[in-house]
Amino acid sequence: MASLCRIVKHGSNLCNVLERKLPSTVVSLRHLNLQEYQSKKLMQDHGINVQNFRIATNINEAEEIAHSFHVEEYVIKAQILAGGRGKGTFSSGLVGGVQLTKDPKEVPKFANGMLGYNLVTKQTGKDGVKVNKIMIAEAVDIARETYLAILMDRESGGPVIVASPAGGVDIEQVAKETPDLIYKEVIDITRGITDSQARNIAQKLKFEKDLLHEAAQQIKKLYEIFIKVDATQIEINPFGETKDHRVLCFDAKFNFDDNAEFRQKKIFEMDDHSESDPREVDAAKYHLNYIGMDGNIACMVNGAGLAMATMDIIHIYGGKPANFLDVGGMVQEEQVYQAFRILTSDSNVKAILVNIFGGIVNCAIIAKGITNACQNIQLKVPLIVRLEGTNVDEAKIILANSGLPIVTATDLDDAAKKAVASLN
């Protein structure tokens, strides 16, 4: 998604956050992620061409699929959210999370080396991710690869299609080296995509003769599903043609509008938390935005921009943030308590820095939540608090009268200094 943000200059707020270089190793921002097979099933159900596939969760299922699913060649793919699966290594010793075979007897053998084992790729931690599902699919000979994406664009105030005949590779690299191969088509959201627009995009992707109409129809269906499921982005890479003259979506990445969860309950129920940091999942229950990091100074802040600044200044003074935690603008006392509970669940945390700039946020509510949390959790690490804004004087009185060893700070600079010094 970050690469698309650079191509379509004005993306969503999430794009803007992703574009920032966080000052530590960060798990990506938490949002609904679908496994490859889930994305393909979603597209398949909406009339979009994908390769034939089946899913196995154990060796018996893999054997049954090998006997009943007859194709010329099989591709067996481990289903995890991280990229780089093809070059990954399993804890079983098997190398490669994507395997090809024409022998159905080898399908369960590959399944045996994948299921239940951790797969380590360039996008996972050193311990990898446990594989609970594999996709057994028809291996397809790709004749040509193109790139197609649909996303919401701030500049045009609606959907835009980004397309390139150079697919199957890093689209950001294409944009850098051959920008003339990147095409942008703005769609009127009230009118929808027109036949001429779909055909124009298909032509720019260099589909010819009988495949031109089929590609245009697939582009229209992709736009229809984009609107229907409240997606913020659909990225198909590659969107291509096969040697037997079919138009297929070979791989897909969906992002969804979190605010549309009430309309898209079935899709959001597909969210698989097995690969997520349990603290992130826990925080989401209380409408807290939490991302675990590898430092030892925990941060509780209101607003993503302020959180970034807080982490940056901790680094400047020689510290390392343990997390990104944004409590938002409508935080209540109970959420502050839950935030402290989650922060202190990290054994690496040796100090906590609270940095609140209250506009919508009531500093007095934050102060009450802090004192309640400290008393109930029996906080054993230094706590540095900087409050500014709405009801800050009342908040300072609450903290001063709490009898708790809370270190107050006059500004962000002072808070960061004190937080780093407290480690010693």
Image (spheres, rainbow, N blue to C red):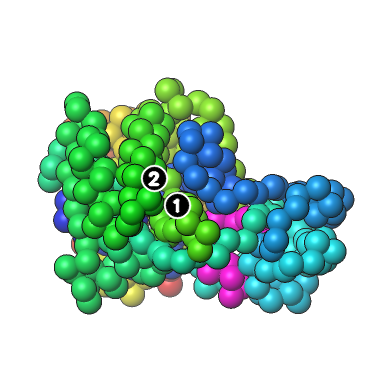
Q: For the view shown, which residue lies furthest in the left direction?
A: 155
Residue named by callout 1: 247
Snapshot quadrant of residue 336: top left
Q: Nearer the viewer, residue 206 or 117?
A: 206
Q: Position of residue 41 (x, y in %)?
A: 56, 40
Q: Position of residue 131 (x, y in %)?
A: 69, 58
Residue 78 is a magenta residue: yes
Q: Nearer the viewer, residue 34 or 286?
A: 34
321 sits to left or right of 60: left
Q: Amino acid at mark 1?
A: Val
Snapshot quadrant of residue 28: bottom left
Q: Position of residue 31 (x, y in %)?
A: 44, 44
Could you tell me if residue 412 is visible in this image? no
Question: Looking at the rendered structure, which numbered label has been put on residue 214?
Answer: 2
Q: In the rendered view, tell whether residue 415 sits above or below residue 102.
A: above
Q: Secondary structure at mark 2?
A: helix
Q: Residue at x 42, y 65 (%)?
A: 144
Q: Nearer the viewer, residue 417 or 64?
A: 64
23 sits to left or right of 80: left
Q: Position of residue 226 (x, y in %)?
A: 36, 37
Whether the residues at callouts 2 and 1 have beta carbons within 8 Å, the answer is yes
Residue 397 is a magenta residue: no
Q: Nearer the viewer, residue 199 or 286?
A: 199
What residue range appears in magenta?
Answer: 76-88
Quarter of the figure that contains the C terminus = bottom left
Snapshot quadrant of residue 391: top left
Q: CA distance from mark 2 to mark 1?
A: 7 Å
Q: Residue at x 19, y 53 (%)?
A: 184
Which mark is first along the chain, 1 or 2? 2
